[in-house]
Image (tube, rainbow, N blue to C red):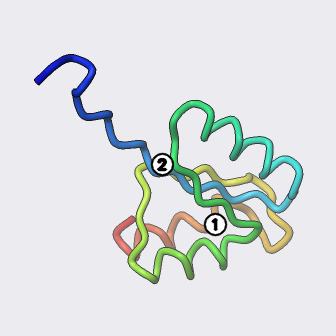
Amino acid sequence: MMPSEAAAPEAVRAILVDDDELYREAISGELEFHGFTVSAFPTGEQMLAHLETGASAEVIVLDWKLESGLGIDLLPHLRSRGK
């Protein structure tokens, strides 16, 4: 195999949860620029519903203070799902 034919590494899947739309778009764009595949959500509930479909990620970035509560409060929900 020639060096130019080497398989590109698979992008790291990331989930971003932030209720600020402009910030969410900016951070998503920056992560994608750096090679991540990003699924972004405005609420923790939407992120949990996404994960219930069988989706997964290697990295989850949570806003500390969401409109519906603290991002850290989502951790027990993620752990109970084995995430």
Quarter of the figure with residue 32? top right
Q: Residue 52: image x %, image y %?
A: 46, 82
Quick one: quadrant of the N terminus? top left
Q: What's the mark number on residue 59?
A: 2
The residue lying at 80 percent from left, 57 percent from top is 65
Q: The residue under label 1 is which amino acid type?
A: Asp
Q: In this view, does 25 lie to the left or right of 4?
A: right
Q: In this view, does 24 lie to the left or right of 28?
A: right
Could you tell me which residue is drawn at 66 percent across and 60 percent down? Answer: 40
Q: In this view, does 10 lie above or below 55?
A: above
Which mark sits nearer the N-terminus, 1 or 2?
2
Identify the residue position indicated by label 1 in the image: 73
- Residue drawn 59% across the image and 60% down it: 39
Q: Under tag 2, what secondary structure?
A: strand
Q: Position of residue 56 (x, y in %)?
A: 41, 64
The image's mark for residue 14 is none
Give how far across and how far down residue 6 sits, in percent.
22, 27
The correct choice, above or below, for 52 with respect to 71 in the image is below
| Numbered disc in front, either 1 or 2 | 2
Q: In this view, does 22 lie to the left or right of 64?
A: right
Measured from the top left, where is residue 79 in percent x and y?
41, 68
Q: Which amino acid does label 2 sit on?
A: Val
Q: Is residue 36 above or below residue 58?
A: above
